[in-house]
Image (cartoon, rainbow, N blue to C red):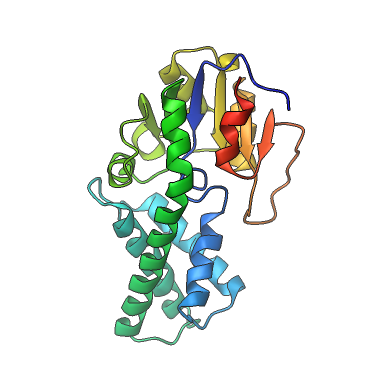
């Protein structure tokens, strides 16, 4: 194993990296749809998921003081409302609200379990490196970090809804490098998305550790582009010399 010996700082992605350890959020949500017996196909769910994400990007449903359970309830409710409106789900408001609550609860528990693995990694690395977070989020990432006991590990946070730039635009990683204070070549980016993390981070000259896992499909990837390819965030410290 070739170690990265020239890294001085680490930029972390959040969603799909720290909170799910490489599993795409659509897959996490779909597993809870199945567990709760929501009578829709995965293809139909995908449409609702995309609709919900686009809605969240356009409309400030999420407020700065919303914790992650709040985000999940809003996210799932947007999906279910779309399914009802499109006549893909025959459910009363009471039934839909029950689905939303149960799905949000299940997803929240899932993240708590994953954080038992990922949080110690972040904590360990924060003792050796300057850490910066770069995330496409809804304006409440600071509340999320506090909710999950991650707020003391990052020297700075670059959040898309705050800075006005979203991945995969490389500009958001340039902001991350500026916040880091080290040259891009001495900065390691850790993220789960090839398109949104690996490509733009390499574009600005960073080293990259790709947390490759259960993606969303349809994404062209190249394992030779990142400096490290791993499937579990717990493996990251072993690559750092």
Q: Nearer the viewer, residue 227 or 38?
A: 227
Q: Is residue 219 visible?
A: yes
Q: So how many labels did they put on this image?
A: 0
Residue 217 falls in image quadrant: bottom right
The quarter of the rendered structure image containing the N terminus is top right
Q: Is residue 165 visible?
A: no
Question: Height in image: 108 above or below 165?
Answer: below
**Residue 176: x %, y % from top left:** 46, 24
Between 108 and 66, the one nearer to me in the picture: 108
Give whichever of 111, 124 is nearer the camera. Answer: 124
Residue 37 percent location from the top left of the image: 48, 82
Residue depicted at 42% across the width and 26% down the height: 126
Q: Position of residue 151 (x, y in %)?
A: 31, 35
The quarter of the image holding the C terminus is top right
Residue at left offset 59%, top offset 22%: 204
Q: Which residue reaches farthest left? A: 65
- Residue at 33% across, 71% down: 101
Q: Is residue 169 above or below residue 193?
A: above
Is 72 placed above or below 173 here?
Answer: below
Left or right, residue 51 beside residue 145:
right
- Give the residue displayed 38% in from the left and 60% down from the top: 108
Q: Position of residue 132 (x, y in %)?
A: 42, 27
Query: Based on the displayed image, in which of its 4 quarters is residue 184 positioned?
Result: top right
């Amino acid at each position: 194993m070739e170690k990265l010996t020239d890294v001085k700082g680490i930029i972390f992605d959040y969603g799909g990296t720290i909170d799910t350890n490489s599993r795409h959020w659509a897959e996490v949500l779909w597993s809870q749809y199945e567990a709760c017996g929501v009578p829709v196909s995965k293809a139909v769910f995908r449409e609702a998921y995309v609709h919900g994400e686009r809605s969240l990007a356009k409309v400030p449903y999420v407020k700065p003081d919303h914790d992650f359970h709040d985000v999940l309830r809003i996210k799932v409710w947007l999906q279910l409302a779309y399914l009802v409106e499109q006549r893909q789900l025959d459910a009363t408001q009471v039934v839909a609200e029950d689905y939303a609550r149960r799905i949000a609860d299940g997803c929240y528990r899932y993240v708590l379990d994953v954080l038992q693995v990922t949080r110690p990694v972040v904590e360990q690395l924060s003792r050796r490196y300057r850490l910066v977070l770069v995330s496409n989020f809804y304006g409440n990432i600071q509340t999320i970090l506090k909710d999950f006991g991650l707020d003391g590990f990052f020297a700075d946070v670059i959040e898309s809804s705050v800075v006005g730039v979203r991945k995969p635009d490389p500009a958001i990683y340039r902001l991350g490098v500026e916040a880091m204070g080290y040259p891009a070549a001495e900065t390691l980016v850790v993220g789960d998305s090839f398109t949104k993390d690996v490509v733009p981070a390499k574009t600005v000259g960073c080293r990259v550790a790709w947390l490759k896992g259960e993606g969303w499909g349809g994404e062209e990837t190249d394992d030779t582009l990142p400096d490290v390819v791993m499937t579990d965030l717990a493996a990251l410290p072993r690559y750092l010399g």
